[in-house]
Amino acid sequence: MGRKVKFDRRTLLGGAAISVATGLIGQASRAAGSYDPGANDSEIRIGQFGPLSGPVSSFGVLAYAMKAYFGMINEQGGINGRKIVFINYDDAYSPPKSVEAARRLVESDEILFIAGAMGTPGNIAVQKYMNARKVPQLFLAAAASKLSDPANYPWTMVSGTTYEMEGGVLGRYIASTFPSAKIAVLYQNDDAGKATLAGFKAGLGSRASKIISELTYYATDPTVDSQTVQMKAADADAVLLVTIPKMAVQALRKMAALNWKPQVFLGTGNSSARATLSPAGFENAQGVLALSARQDPGNPLWAAEPDMKEYMGFLDRYVPDADRDDALYSAGYTIAATTTHVIRRCGDDLTRVNVLRQATSLNGFAAPLLIPGITMNTSPNDYVPIKQFQLMQFKGEKYEKLGGLLSAP
């Protein structure tokens, strides 16, 4: 027979006490949450970088809008009881400075993840580093497809669409609506411009042979007047401007000076009535066609929309000196709101793996200020949140909707 083991009352009570204590510790641990660097019981640190100075410093207001939005969230008690600490650095639109900023955010500031970083070149420059460190690089204010490539860079994703997808939608529209058009393209000689052109040609399909003029410029160039003259000389009757707003303004003015009236197409990055068409002169922008996914705060078309009313109230209280018509403020607002949505979904599991999991499982999320009918949808195999657009046509002093939503395949 085996040896009998005796348990007295003190042994039983002691064991029960240890069991209860262990259970309470486990519950307390679970209640406190699961954390990676950048998060704890009281705060969540989010990083961002972008051009607060340099040739495209006007884009910096996107960061100011994000900071103000997170300030509003903190005033309301934070997210699941935790305050947001938003840390952003100026990279002056210089990729080496972007790398410096990303390393500082990850290694010194110990952020949980990056959100809303601005600029295609800078984000591409830090992509390998962020993925090697397994730190999410989310909702970027950039749109190259290599920034939403889950197979090769699973920790990186854009905030909206990709240049290739946008170019493809425009290409398909032109191929079906203006099949005989002779096309000229002016694009910025960088990753963003090249990616849009590649998508545009793919969308045109066999009609890509209709591109009779393909010209480039650099962001530091003083003007694009000579390129505009060359496009006219090529006798193009449809022009796609893949440019920053400054260059689109110059091209539209030069077309008017040349008394040349081709059908002009703009993308989501240079079609703002406030930043592009007003400086170009509304009289020089009549009939311009552009894709849009978000409501333009300067367009009375959207003034009665609930999202726009809420946004204007946000500006009144948290960014009273903002230019209310500047679409870059609204872009930062949408990115910050989407980031907040993802963090809320994380609950108390504030690990980088879970942040990525929530960001890549959006299903019909109607982010604030998206055009009604357009929603964000992602999956572990699809990192492009926005795949629908509204074609807009400029008439008088504002854009009007032209037809229904256009969808990428």
Image (spheres, rainbow, N blue to C red):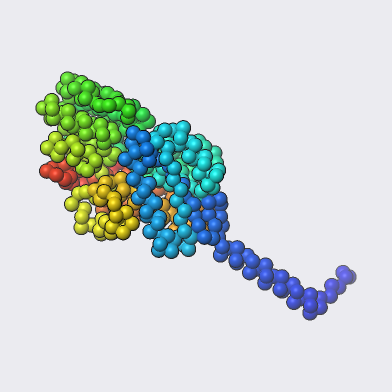
Query: Which of the 4 quarters of the picture holds residue 384?
Result: top left
Image x and y of residue 196, in percent: 32, 33
Query: Which of the 4 quarters of the picture holds residue 312?
Result: bottom left
Q: Residue at x 15, y 37 (%)?
A: 281
- Quadrant location, the C terminus: top left
Instruction: Tell me if residue 2 comes above or below residue 117 in the rendering.
Output: below
Q: Residue at x 44, y 45 (%)?
A: 88
Return the residue found at the far front: 321
In the displayed structure, does residue 170 sit left or right of residue 382? left
Instruction: Tell me if residue 188 comes above or below residue 105 in the rendering.
Output: above
Instruction: Tell me if residue 263 comes above or below residue 59 in the rendering.
Output: above
In the displayed structure, does residue 17 sit left or right of residue 237? right
Q: Nearer the viewer, residue 330 or 25?
A: 330
Q: Nearer the viewer, residue 264 or 326?
A: 326
Image x and y of residue 122, in percent: 42, 35
In the displayed structure, does residue 340 sit left or right of residue 258? right
Q: Nearer the viewer, residue 26 or 52?
A: 52
In the displayed structure, does residue 273 sit left or right of residue 62? left
Q: Residue at x 35, y 46 (%)?
A: 62
Image x and y of residue 131, in percent: 51, 40
Image x and y of residue 54, in percent: 36, 35
